[in-house]
Amino acid sequence: MTCPVRITSAAWRDLTEIHDWIAENDSIESAGLVLDRIWEAAEGIAAMPRRGSRPKELPIKMEAEYRQVFFKPYRVIYEIRRNEIVIHLIADGRRNLQSLLLRRLTR
């Protein structure tokens, strides 16, 4: 059984920024390839939402169930809800993401 996957507007902006940065610093082809791979990782969540690991930056006592999958070095951070998966953040995993994650997930 697959769950519908919804991506937040903030996560769409993340994808746009990643694409633009790679296109400017490498090539448009590389940018497209990276976005395709990130999207493949995100699509895999629909079939197996609990396969991802819990982001280590999040406090243990957070009530919602947040997980992450990777297309290294990128991380796709998502929430498992009753009847859907919500992608909140797509970011370079080499960054310190704790404050960004908490800001996005506790709005």
Image: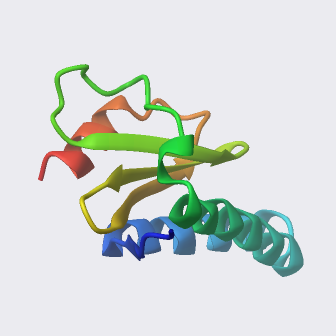
**Image quadrant assignment for residue 85:** bottom left
Instruction: Residue 31: give x, y in percent of width and height.
Output: 77, 72
Residue 22: image quadrant is bottom right
The image shows residue 40 at horizontal and vertical percentages of: 70, 67
Residue 19 image offset from top left, x and y in percent: 66, 72
Picture layout, residue 94 above or below residue 72? above
The color scheme shown is rainbow
**Is 65 situated left or right of 41 in this image?**
left
Measuring 85% from the left and 65% from the top, which residue is drawn there? 26
Quarter of the rendering containing residue 59: top left
Residue 94 x, y percent position in the rendering = 61, 33
The residue furthest front is 1
Residue at 18%, 31% (x, y): give it. 62
Name the residue: 33% across, 52% down: 79
At a point 50% along the width and 70% down the height, the residue shown is: 2
Q: Is residue 60 left or right of residue 72?
A: left
Q: Is residue 66 above or below residue 32?
A: above
- Identify whether 39 is placed above or below 76: below
- Answer with left or right where residue 85 lies relative to residue 41: left
- Using the image as rendered, state which of residue 30 and residue 48 is in the foreground: 48
Q: How many marks?
A: 0
